[in-house]
Image: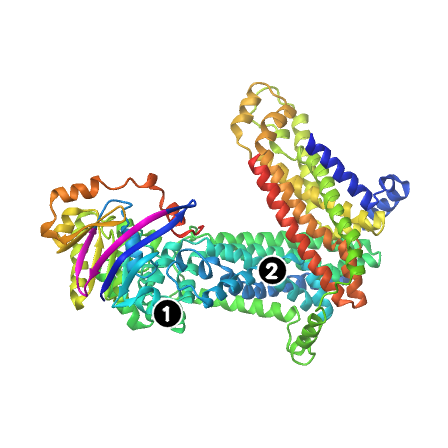
Amino acid sequence: MNYLLDAVGKEYVARRQTVCALQGVSLSVQKGEVLAVLGGSGAGKTTLFRLLNATLRPTSGSLRLDGRELGALSSLDLRRTRRRIGTIYQQHNLVPSLTALQNTLCGCLGRWSLVETVRSILSPTKADVEQALHALELVELADKRSARADELSGGQQQRLAIARMLMQKPEVILADEPIASLDPALTDGIMSLLIRVGSQGQRTLVVAMHKVGLALQHFPRVIGLRSGAVFFDRPSAEVDKGLLHDLYAGHRQEPARVKDDDRFQREFGCAR
Amino acid sequence: MGVLLSVFLVLAVCWQVENVRLAVILQPATFTALWEFLRGLFPPDLSLGFLRIVFFALLSTVATAIAGTVLSVLIAIPLGALATPMLWRRGILSTGENRNWFSALQSLGSRMVFAFMGFLRAVPDLVWGLLFVTAVGLGSLAGALALAVAYAGVLGRVYADVFADVDPRPLEALQATGATRAQIFLRGIWPQALPNVMAYTLYSFECCVRAASVLGFVGAGGIGYEVSLSMRLFEYRQVLTLILAFILLLALTDIVSRKVRSRLQPNSTGSQRRPWFKGEHFARRTLGYAAMVTLVGASFYLAGFSPEHFGEANTLKNMLRFFLSMVPPDFAKAFVLSLGPLLMQTLAISILGTVIGIVIGGILAIPATSTLVLEKSDSPGAQSKVRRGLGWSTYWAARLILNILRSIPDLVWVLVCIVVVGIGPFAGTLAIGLHTAGVLGKLYAETLEEVPRQPVEALRALGAGRLQLLAWALWPQAKPMLISYTVLRWETNLRVSAILGLVGGGGLGQAIYNNVQLGFYSRLATLLLLVYLLVMASDWIGGTLSRRTARA
């Protein structure tokens, strides 16, 4: 899938003040491209990801997916598009009371009908279970298949989120800090798994991360976000120390780094 | 000062509106009536023939409650899902959705479902009982239907809140995989909400058992029907038996639901013993489901959901005809104006009744607070056995009185008060006062017991007496809770006072009962709307008051 972002901006209203999360972001991402997004906290990475996975609509500018304007998609097309994009969230966003296997099966929801969903709750088909177990094996979680998601450790939850994404078989993989809660021993494994999965079948892979070294090592193209705008967008070979220093040093102090829950409320105006 | 003055003013107006004659209580005739009634209660009628009647009345009460609960859950789940704002209106799931006429329609529909549940909830279950008795005839079928409708409103609202309270982040993730709303509900919301849904459903079942017992007063079967029958026949000994049976039923329900609740606790998986045979788990589970299905099926049958009711006897058609005859409501000026005094009377009953409850409950709460009357066994000084015994007996006596006041339903109190002071609003006021005294007294005592201990210990250590402890350590800490409990209770009482008239306690209920008896169904509709408005207003006032006190 191709992305074409032209002067995309996203504003939200917090305490009757308009806050700009993204402004004038112009990018293009080709099918099969692999890139990393760097930037301090509050730079707009998460908002960018929500735009890219079609769960948030921009307030200005145009966002085209395969040449089709996001705002012009019908509800059905919107869902079909989302099915093709797999997201790994920073907070994993697993359903806490479902088992690892059930959470993995949730990756299929986009291609299941309602009847198939109900059947999968009562007794999932053998083929689906096998697929899900395979995904769990890839992230080394097969032995935890019957554990509830909220009984898993942070790193295990992270890997389970990856398994759900694998189950979805997306054309685009968006990963928001996928290694933040992994220990160093697992980091490399998961990183290369993501890149391997990405390279299979020409999948687009966009990864937001904090670890600059890893980003430069694994990704040919790097985008730096600062204060909601693209600060640089260039091959990793051309990213130097000074540029990185400016990226992090100059970044806007996020307003008092609120709790996640609070942030949700502010960004979406929804009371939890 | 202003507050006190306005309280006095309100009380004086209530006094006038209700035409309270305090002299009535103090007349010797009243005491004789009370004495006659109390003497008539003993000994309870324990003859085999009557016990049989009691047993079947209990059975049909439980069956009605189970059938009503199951039906209400079946209605409430879809209503709750439709009313969940997160799915249809706002929040994280709507940020990327298209905004067009269709989504506007969905949002409007969701709001309408919410308002509809408010209406179901606002009409008291006893009134629903009366409506269904008129629609489908006397018996527990009407009771079960009334419970189904009334509690569908309550549960639907609670479910909607529970659904809205789940963590939205997993839902966002599911939406991002391309899941539809139905899938997000099934796989994201429902699993997260299930424990709370179970807990509230169980709680609602307990309420249904209480309600099913009382619905008989308007002819909807069960133990309440027997109580009103025995009352009318002046068989007070039977009344005592029935009340004892009712208290037993409540205790049993309490035990059963406590058991189920401890099963539901996620952390108490029970002892991990080895299964007796292979597949024991499966067998047990199958057996459990089978027992469940049998129980529910039997309940529906006992509650009157038999084929002959729905097949031949045109029950559904009668129901439809009855509800259609209620539209349009009667808004003729003379009739609407005649409701004014009744409305005032209802308000007055609720206020005076609550005040009586506060006074009696407050006085009884002090000896029922263990911190104040019970000496600890390890407290130093010469411990006189007599004094400790006295403390214990006051404590238990106060608790006993409060429990009796509380566990006899307010409508039974109305019947009792009618025997003593005659039919009318005064009987209703006294009844509300006595029941409220039991409820509030227990709440007050528990709140006073649960205040943080350290200040109490400190004051005790510096030599404070009991009343000083109450005034300086317990009251200041418990005050906000006490006030908000009282306000909540007044809200409940306002609802109750709107239906007291169904059994002769004055207020709007009287008019509801009369119009049903006379077959003026369009006037009935007007009255129901008025009850709805009254409840909405009380919700609003209660909310404002408790917010104000929370700030103070």
Q: Which quadrant holds the C terminus of chain B?
A: top right
The answer for which chain carries disc 2 is B
**Amino acid found under the numbered disc labelled 2:** Tyr
Q: Is residue B66 left or right of residue A3?
A: right
Which residue is labeled 2 in the image? B151
> Few, some or many C-alpha atoms within 10 Å of disc 2 (few <14, some 14-19, many ≥20)?
many
Q: Could you say which disc has been placed on residue B36 in the image?
A: none
Number of numbered discs on residues: 2
Residue drawn where x is 41% and y is 70% of the image: A118
Where does the magenta region start and end?
Answer: A19-37
Image coordinates of residue B11 in percent, x first then y, are 76, 39
Q: Residue at x 77, y 46 (%)?
A: B429
User: Do discs 1 and 2 share a chain?
Assistant: no
Task: Name the element at disc 2.
Answer: helix
Residue type (three-letter) at the residue carrying disc 1: Ser
x, y percentage for residue A238? 10, 50
Q: In front: B155, or B224?
A: B155
Who's the residue at 74% across and 67% down the image? B522
Among the 4 quarters of the image, the one containing residue B203: bottom right
Cα–Cα span, label 1 and label 2: 39 Å
Q: Choose top left, top right, bottom left or bottom right for residue B185.
A: bottom left
Residue bearing mark 1: A74
Eyeballing the image, is B371 above or below B202? above
> Is residue B343 visible in this depiction of the protein?
yes
Residue A34 in the magenta stretch? The answer is: yes
Residue B148: x %, y % from top left: 61, 64
Q: Is residue B139 visible?
A: no
Task: Identify which residue, B254 or B333, lies in the foreground.
Answer: B333
